[in-house]
Image: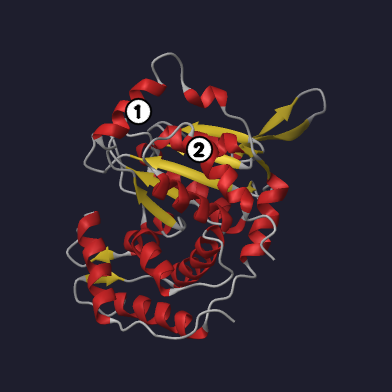
C-alpha cells in the first residue's frame, strides 16, 4: 500500500544537503505537500526560509516559479492578463506565474491585501478566474510562501481568509551553534542548492497523495480532533476559532505525517505534533492580538483539557 513511501526519504535527504539542522521543519513541509496543502514559513530575514522553499521546489521535477511580493505588485502580475493582439484582432490571455506546479511566494506579506487576495481562489480551488474566464491550474499546485514577522518594517498582516488557506504556518527559528558552523562551511565556496536535482516527479507526488488517502484514522481520533477544534470556538479570549476547513486540514495532515513515518494508521502523537502548526495561525484573538506565542499557548492549554482516547489505532 505504501509503495512510494521510500520517496519521502529521498526528498528529505535531498533537502538536507542544503538545509542544516531543520529536519523537523522539512518533515512538516513534506507533510503539507503530501496532504495537498500549502505552507507558510515565517521568521526574521536571513533564517533560510527562501532557501528551504527553493530546495523543496528543486526536489520535485515540475514547473517552478517565484514571485517576489512587493507593495506595488498587482493581482494581474500573479494571475495573468488578457492582451490585445493586433495581428489577430483579438485578446489573448498571457498566463501569470500562478500557472506552475510549485510557486514560491516570497515575502508574501509585503504586498497589499488586494494583491494577496489574488491567491485565494488559486489555493482553495486550484483554478483562477480572469475576466469571467476560469482556467484550471496544473496538478500538483503547491504554494510555499515566506513572510517576515509583521513587526518588520514594510509588511502587512495577512487577512484571516488568506491565513486559513495555508494548511500550516511554520516558524523556522535560528540554527544551533554547530548548525551555523555547518552552514558557513557549506556556503564557503558556492551555494549547495546549485548541486541538487529533482528526486521525484509530479506524477509520483500525485501517487503519494493517493496513498496518503488510504492511511487509516480511527473514528475516536476524528472525534478527538473535533473536540479540540470545538474548544477553540468557545474560549473568551478567542474571537474566531478554527474553521471546518482547519479541521479537515488537520485530519489530512495527520494521515500524511503517519505516511512519512512509515505507518498506515494515525496515532494521537501525530495530532499533538501537528496541532500548533495547523491550528494556531487560524485563531483570531478577542483582544486583537496576533502574537504567535499566545495562540500556541491556547492550543497547549486545550490539549491539557481535552482527554485523548485510548484505543488500538490500526485497523
Can you see residue 253?
yes
Q: Quadrant of residue 305?
A: bottom left
Can you see residue 97?
no
Residue 18 spot, x, y in % from top left: 46, 31
Query: For the image shown, how many numbered marks are present on the structure?
Result: 2
- Please tell me whether mark 1 sits on a helix, a strand or a loop: helix
- Numbered circle sitting on residue 219: none
Q: Quadrant of residue 91?
A: top right
Q: Is residue 58 above or below residue 35?
A: above
Q: Callout 2: few (<14), some (14-19), or many (20+) C-alpha neighbours within 10 Å?
A: many
Task: Point out the image quarter for the C terminus.
Answer: bottom right
Task: Point out the image quarter for the N terminus.
Answer: bottom right
Q: Is residue 46 left or right of residue 195?
A: left
The single residue placed furthest to the left in the displayed view is 287
Front residue of 114 and 161: 161
Q: Is residue 95 above or below residue 236?
A: above
Residue in the picture at 35% in, 37% down: 110
- Numbered circle sitting on residue 15: 2
Q: Is residue 163 left or right of residue 215?
A: left
> Where is mark 1, residue-wise?
182
Q: CA distance from mark 2 to mark 1?
A: 15 Å
Q: Quadrant of residue 209?
A: bottom right
Residue 118 spot, x, y in % from top left: 51, 46
Residue 109 spot, x, y in % from top left: 36, 41
Amino acid at each position: 500500500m505504501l509503495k512510494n513511501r521510500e520517496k519521502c526519504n529521498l526528498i528529505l535527504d535531498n533537502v538536507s544537503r542544503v538545509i542544516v539542522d531543520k529536519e523537523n521543519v522539512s518533515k512538516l513541509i513534506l507533510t503539507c505537500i503530501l496532504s495537498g496543502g500549502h505552507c507558510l514559513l515565517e521568521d526574521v530575514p536571513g533564517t533560510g526560509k527562501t532557501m528551504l522553499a527553493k530546495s523543496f521546489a528543486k526536489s520535485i521535477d515540475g514547473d517552478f516559479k517565484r514571485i517576489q511580493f512587493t507593495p506595488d505588485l498587482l493581482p494581474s502580475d500573479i494571475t495573468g492578463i488578457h492582451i490585445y493582439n493586433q495581428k489577430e484582432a483579438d485578446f489573448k490571455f498571457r498566463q501569470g506565474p500562478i500557472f506552475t506546479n510549485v510557486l514560491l511566494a516570497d515575502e508574501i506579506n509585503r504586498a497589499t491585501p488586494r494583491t494577496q487576495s489574488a491567491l485565494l481562489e488559486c489555493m482553495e480551488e486550484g483554478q483562477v478566474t480572469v475576466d469571467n474566464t476560469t482556467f484550471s491550474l496544473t496538478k500538483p499546485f503547491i504554494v510555499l510562501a515566506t513572510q517576515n514577522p509583521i513587526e518588520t518594517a514594510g509588511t502587512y498582516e495577512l487577512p484571516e481568509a488568506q491565513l486559513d488557506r495555508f494548511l500550516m504556518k511554520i516558524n523556522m527559528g535560528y540554527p544551533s551553534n554547530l548548525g551555523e558552523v555547518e552552514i558557513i562551511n557549506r556556503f564557503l565556496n558556492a551555494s549547495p542548492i546549485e548541486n541538487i536535482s529533482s528526486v521525484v516527479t509530479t506524477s509520483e507526488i500525485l501517487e503519494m497523495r493517493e496513498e496518503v488517502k488510504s492511511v487509516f484514522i480511527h473514528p475516536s481520533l476524528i472525534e478527538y480532533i473535533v473536540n479540540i477544534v470545538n474548544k477553540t470556538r468557545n474560549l473568551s479570549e478567542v474571537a474566531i476559532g478554527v474553521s471546518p476547513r482547519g479541521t479537515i486540514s488537520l485530519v489530512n495532515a495527520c494521515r500524511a505525517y503517519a505516511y512519512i513515518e512509515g505507518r498506515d494508521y494515525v496515532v494521537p502523537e501525530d495530532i499533538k505534533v501537528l496541532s500548533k502548526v495547523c491550528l494556531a495561525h487560524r485563531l483570531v484573538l478577542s483582544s486583537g492580538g496576533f502574537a504567535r506565542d499566545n495562540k500556541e499557548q491556547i492550543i497547549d492549554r486545550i490539549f491539557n483539557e481535552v482527554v485523548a482516547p485510548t484505543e488500538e489505532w490500526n485497523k
